[in-house]
Amino acid sequence: MSRRPAYFPGAFFLCLFVSRLPAGEFSPSALIDRLPSLLSEVPQPPEVTEAEIEELEDGADAHTYIFLTEARAHPPKAVNLGGDGVLSLTRAATGESVRARYRGPDGLYNKAEMEKISRVMRCSLTGKTAPPSEKLLELLDAVEDHFGGGLTLLSGYRTPRLNRKVAGAARRSMHMLGWAADIRVSGQTSGKVAAYARRFRSGGVGHYPLMDFTHIDAGAARSWSVRRSSGKAGR
């Protein structure tokens, strides 16, 4: 095995300093003149949002934080699945209802209307909200339009703190992004709702027959069924 020469660390830092010199200034005298300032420079801190700080203070571990940061940098593309652009949700725990035209006739998404939906889908533990995925809204809209009568929301956005409290919840739950909803449709079995949602081959569809609800999310196309009471409750 070859060994690095003893001067390697010094050469590395020399190359680093040279790379940071402005074009046309590389000369021994220029390097010597700039060396003190280069040694004293402090890198700029990364940009951080208040929401990211709150998540860290919520106790999100490193893996969860990285998952949330990376996922939000690459949100799923919205797919119009034939819905009318109007979504009606009723939150089971509080009875709150919302009817929002999240997408206009021009195909553009209305952020003010989407905020109304996010308030109903807020974290039940902390009251925090997250912008709902446009793709998720399109999926829910298509399901609602097919069956009619509006949707009952059992679980929407979860902060990392709430997700840890949900028995069996996936560590990388789409709920922590605001990209998932656990729903019921009045007069329909969860199996029938899940079967219809799977037809789109867009997003995740989970069937939970013992608790009679369907999980829908804006992630990759996949499906699963949990028939045990100890199974994961809404990924």
Image: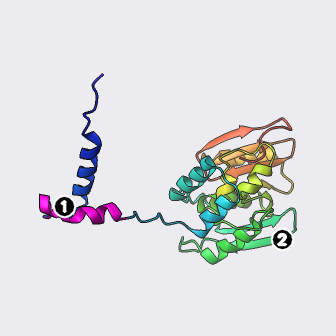
Mark 2 = which residue?
A: 96
N-term mark: 1 or 2:
1
Tell me the residue at 73%/44% (across/down): 206
Which is more foreground, mark 1 or mark 2? 1
Tell me which corner region of the image, top left, top right, bottom left or bottom right, holds residue 223.
Answer: top right
- Label ID, residue 73: none
Q: Please state which of residues 170 and 21 is positioned toward the viewer in this rendering.
A: 21
Residue 2 image position (x, y, % from top left): 27, 25
Task: Say few, some or many: other residues with alpha carbon within 10 Å of mark 2 (under 14 / 14 to 19 / 20 or more).
Answer: few
Nearer to the camera, 173 or 214? 173
Count residues near mark 1 (Cα–Cα under 10 Å), then give few for <14, some for 14-19, many for 20+: few
Amino acid type at circle 1 is Ile
Is residue 179 visible from the viewing direction of this image?
no
Kind of residue at badge 2: Glu
Q: Which residue is mark 1?
A: 32
In which quarter of the view is residue 221 placed?
A: top right
Give the spatial CA distance, label 1 vs label 2.
68 Å
* 166 left or right of 112 in image: right
Are circles 1 and 2 on residues that touch, CB within 8 Å? Answer: no
Identify the element where label 1 is drawn: helix
Residues drawn in magenta: 25-41
Query: Whole-percent x and y of residue 200?
Result: 62, 48
- Residue occupying image coordinates x 72% and y 60%: 157
Can you give x and y, in whole percent of width and height, for residue 141 in the image? 68, 61
Is residue 38 magenta-colored?
A: yes
Magenta segment main secondary structure: helix
**In the image, residue 77 lies in the stretch drawn in magenta:** no
**Identity of the residue drawn at 80% across and 38% down:** 231
